[in-house]
Image (cartoon, rainbow, N blue to C red):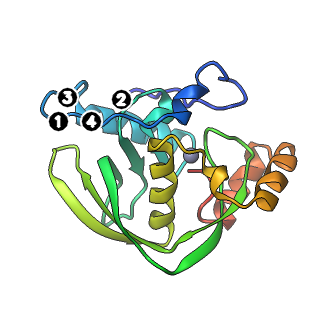
Amino acid sequence: MTKLHIINDLKDQDKIQILKVPCEPFNFENPPEDPLELTKNLIETMYDANGIGLAANQVGLNYRLFVMRGTEDSGDFSCFNPRIVWLSDEHILLEEGCLSYPGVVVKIKRPRHVRLRFEAPSGETITHKFTGITARVIQHEMDHLNGVLFYNNANKYYRDRAFKNRHKYDVGQTQNILQKNISAYL
Ligand SMILES: [Zn+2]
């Protein structure tokens, strides 16, 4: 397994552009990389950074792919070519952080439940309903794959406040936020 470098806006201004354009589908007919190996590397990188989700373009790979922590029962998720096929009318306001924007913690309102269709590393198509933290992670990672920066989904007040307070958070504090707010650090 290989730990990959996560692009962040403070240190990698030259590479950050990849986070602003939509990713390309992963071609299982002619895979550019071994999907299982790719999954392992992304999951290792996510855990190493204390993340709960990580999109391929955050490590400079232009694939529609993200990984996400699961439960002991489900195991971790690796979602290739994911598509949201349903969103709930019910919304919830939660704080989100992002490994590519260290220290930026912003409240965002999003649907509470989501149904996702994606391909597993084996190429098998899976459709599954997610709720709570996983539903939130999925929507954040889908933004990444669509070249959308997560904080642009927040209202201006919360967004401005998050950037103003950014310097207040060091790594330790961000860890506390992770523990207190289930959606921190995606
Ligand atoms: Zn993110």
Instruction: Name which quarter of the figure residue 128 lies in.
Output: bottom left
Q: Is residue 67 above or below residue 154?
A: above
Q: Determine crowd level at label 4: few under 14, some 14-19, many 20+ residues with C-alpha closer than 10 A.
A: some
| Residue visible at 32% across and 33% down in the picture | 38
Q: Which badge, 3 or 4, is on the more N-terminal residue?
A: 4
Q: Which badge, 4 or 2, is on the more N-terminal residue?
A: 2
Kind of element beneath mark 1: loop
| Residue visible at 24% across and 37% down in the picture | 36
Q: Which residue is mark 2?
A: 1
- The amino acid type of the residue labelled 1 equals Phe
Query: How many angstroms separate mark 4 from mark 2 (CA)?
Result: 20 Å
In-image side of 23 versus 133 (left or right): left
- The amino acid type of the residue labelled 2 equals Met
Quick check: is the Cβ at mark 4 less than 8 Å away from ligand 1? no
Q: Are marks 3 and 1 in contact (CB under 8 Å)?
A: yes
Q: Residue furthest top?
A: 14
Residue 31 numbered tag: 3
Q: Determine crowd level at label 3: few under 14, some 14-19, many 20+ residues with C-alpha closer than 10 A.
A: few
- The amino acid type of the residue labelled 3 equals Pro
Q: Which residue is mark 4?
A: 26
Query: How many angstroms separate mark 3 from mark 2 (CA)?
Result: 18 Å
Q: Is residue 176 above or below residue 109?
A: above
Query: How many angstroms separate mark 3 from mark 1 (CA)?
Result: 5 Å
- The amino acid type of the residue labelled 4 equals Phe
Q: Determine crowd level at label 1: few under 14, some 14-19, many 20+ residues with C-alpha closer than 10 A.
A: some
Q: Which residue is mark 1?
A: 28
Q: Are marks 4 and 1 in contact (CB under 8 Å)?
A: yes
Instruction: Name which quarter of the figure residue 2 lies in.
Output: top left
**Foreground: 128 or 152?**
152
